[in-house]
Image (cartoon, helix red, strand yellow):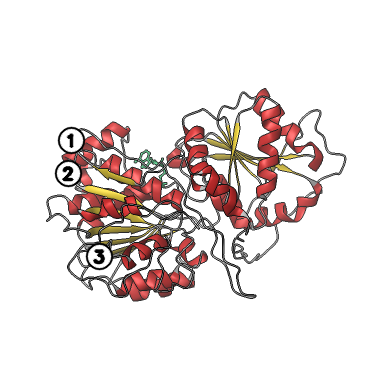
Amino acid sequence: MTFASLGLSEPLLGALADKGYEHPTPVQRQAIPSIISGRDMMAAAQTGTGKTAGFTLPLLERLNGGKSANPNCVRALVLTPTRELAAQVGESVAQYGKYLSLRSAVVFGGVKINPQMMKLRSGVDVLVATPGRLMDLYQQNAVKFNQVEILVLDEADRMLDMGFINDIRKILALMPKQRQNLLFSATFSDDIRTLAKGLLHNPIEIDISHRNTATTTVSQLVHPVDKSKKSALLVHLIKENSWEQVLVFTRTKRGANRLVEYLGKNNISAAAIHSNKSQGARTRALADFKNGKKQVLVATDLAARGIDISDLPHVVNFDLPDVAENYVHRIGRTGRAGAVGEAVSLVCADEIELLSDIESLTGKLLKRKMVEGFEPKHNLPETELKKNIAPKKPKKPKVKKTFTADAHLEEKSVNKSSVNRTSKNGSDSNSKTQSKSKPQSKSKPGKRKRPFDTDSVSKRKRKPAKKSDGQPTRKKPRHGKPARPRKKSSPAK
Ligand code: AMP
């Protein structure tokens, strides 16, 4: 099957040819014609299946040729749970739409809001946003939803896990009733079905996900090893096998930092990506890893969520995840879109229960291989598959109070918001970012905090008297007049 047979026009086919895509993936085959026909959609598709192109291509096809967006208006809105995913989806929109004259923009928290307001002034055809920052922009009259024709909720399950449901509901209430709705989620949980019920009209349902089964093109291996030897074993594996691009998962942020330091001492260039790092540092680490400046990216589960690096050959579980389902997400970073990948887990005796949970969840015992010189003193017992293991809900990530001080210093140097005009000359995507971070307010006991990966402002109670940048705000939106961004922003608090 070809992309042309799915109803995509020349400018999009040209961009796909430039990307080197020859055939649509299963999710693309099913989603593209239905979305072009205007139907609502509920799709269960894991990241790595080609789902982004699955909704972006038909969305661009539908927008192309229509009336362009009025000032501060948006024609298609894509909501994503994390900043990284927003940046990636924004990049895809720019790449696939590079031969179209549509405007696209990406907005997320942790960076200055004013440049984003400026970019929205003339209206955009496609806006990719995280919910918290989008609400802030709305409250400052920088964005209007009355022209929204298409709404996409990407990784909707994750958005619910991260506590975005209230922001999503507020945004939905502000949209015109007549619009196309597309909901993408790794799984169809009960919560997702409830959300879908109130959102979608007579949707086409597609299910590409194979719940809790890892991509078949990923080979999986366990190296039993003592905890104290894990770092040395990782260095050995990287050097011995000449691995050039390795994504390593650790359970803790401190563990990630320590490992980066150890790898550096052993002449392996590495960077860490986790929620104690500023947005600027995270963006740089990811870019350096993608372009080969860093050989190893060490990540925690939350920060790595949604990271897409094409043809990533190696994923290493330095620590096994606490929640077995995260194993599947982790190794889904490799073997994407049919490419062959390798997932290696360094497992010590302490982690036997976690290993057993993963094996029971995925339904198969993982192959084990001792590495000479690293045979463990503490034996890793044999495992067997448990019956009926109920998948645990991933833990809500914690926010560390101390994050902001150094993040603020780190990010003073760069700032650009991410807006692209797609044109015949190609896209100019820019997602280098700067964080304007503020100290977290002390939370009341029992009150859940928003994780840093999400937009930090949206879950806080908004006092109408102050905006997120410390400026006084108008109480009522000035209808009809687009907001004028301030020339100077006040220093981060
Ligand atoms: P996604 O599931 O959207 O995160 O996409 C996973 C990866 O597959 C991305 O790197 C895409 O660039 C790539 N991809 C998407 N569609 C295709 C296709 N039809 N052929 C080859 N690669 C693709």
Q: Distance between the residues labelled 3 and 2?
A: 21 Å
Depth check, mark 3 against mark 2: the one in front is 3
Percent x, y of residue 22? 31, 35
Determine if residue 346 is in view: yes
Q: What element carries label 1?
A: loop
Q: What element carries label 3?
A: loop
Give the residue type that dot 1 points to: Lys
Residue at x-position 33% and y-position 68%: 139
Residue at x-position 74% and y-position 54%: 384
Query: Between 483 and 66, which is closer to the camera in this rendering?
Result: 483
Give the residue type that dot 3 points to: Lys
> In the rendered structure, which disc, 3 or 2, sits on the residue that comes first in sequence?
2
Percent x, y of residue 320? 68, 49
Depth check, mark 1 against mark 3: the one in front is 3
**Can you say whether 129 is above or below 332 in the image?**
below
Percent x, y of residue 223? 73, 38
Q: Is residue 307 left or right of residue 51?
A: right
Q: Do the residues labelled 1 and 2 touch (CB within 8 Å)?
A: yes
> In the rendered structure, which disc, 1 or 2, sits on the residue that comes first in sequence?
2
From the image, tell me which residue sits under label 3: 144
Q: Residues within 10 Å of mark 1 (few under 14, many from 20)?
A: few
From the image, tell me which residue sits under label 2: 101
Taking the image in four quarters, ligand 1 sits in the one at: top left
Q: How crowded is mark 2: few (under 14 residues within 10 Å), some or many (20 or more)?
A: some
Q: Which of the labelled discs sits on residue 424, or is there none?
A: 1
**Can you say whether 172 is above or below 367 in the image?**
below
